[in-house]
Image: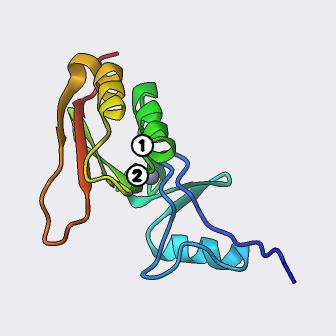
Amino acid sequence: MIITEVFFGVKCNRCQEICKDDEHAYWSDEDSAIEIAHESGWAEIKGKHYCIECHEINKDSGEIEVYEEFPEVLKTLNKFIDRICFGLDRRVFENERTFKVKFHLYKTPILKGFEHEFIKQLLGENLISIQYPEGKFATNKCEIEFSKPSK
Ligand SMILES: [Zn+2]
């Protein structure tokens, strides 16, 4: 017998990260999913959710301030990593001048030729590096760093 079950999770409206506790990313009801997100420091504004990397609380007013939306090029890169490269555990790290996207490759130890080429073309002169850092475990890590595009 086949049955269908519905699970609930919370995804960041800015970086698309899915909220996880130590073991789970999905819950059997909406309230539990939202509760875990709140316990993990996520913010909610008008039904949208933001992870800790994507907002801060204004010290004076106590209001939630969501960081500026990701540039289109980063959204495209993220989609490419998720859907074409099958990147796992993708996370975006941001500082004043650069973005760094870290993820794990599935199956292959490094990006395939056309994937590497697409990313080079997409980021153009903003690309700083595509690296495969060695870790303690053979986990096929990949890190792409690029300068924030000028407006
Ligand atoms: Zn986020």
Give the label on residue 87, or none. 2
- Residue at disc 1, secondary structure: helix
Quarter of image, res 126:
top left
79 vs 117, nearest the viewer: 117
Residue 84 visible here: yes
- Dot 2: within a 10 Å radius of its alpha carbon, few (fewer than 14), some, or many (20 or more) residues? many
Residue 9, given in percent of the width and then of the height, sits at 62, 67
- Dot 1: within a 10 Å radius of its alpha carbon, few (fewer than 14), some, or many (20 or more) residues? many
Residue type at mark 1?
Answer: Ile
Residue 119, given in percent of the width and then of the height, sits at 33, 29
Residue type at mark 2?
Answer: Gly
Quadrant containing the N terminus is bottom right
Q: CA distance from mark 1 to mark 2?
A: 5 Å
Above-or-below relation of 104 to 22: above
Lateral position of residue 129 relative to residue 78, left or right: left
| Tag 1 near tag 2, CB within 8 Å | yes
94 vs 126, nearest the viewer: 126
Residue at (41%, 50%) from the top-left corner? 54
Quadrant containing the C terminus is top left
Above-or-below relation of 136 to 10: below
Q: What colouring method underlies this structural image?
A: rainbow
Residue at (23%, 46%) from the top-left corner? 143
Query: Which residue matches tag 1?
Result: 81
Query: Is the residue marked 1 within 8 Å of ligand 1, measured from its CB?
Result: no
Above-or-below relation of 60 to 116: below
Residue 125, given in percent of the width and then of the height, sits at 21, 17
- Residue at disc 2, secondary structure: loop
Residue at (32%, 19%) from the top-left corner? 121
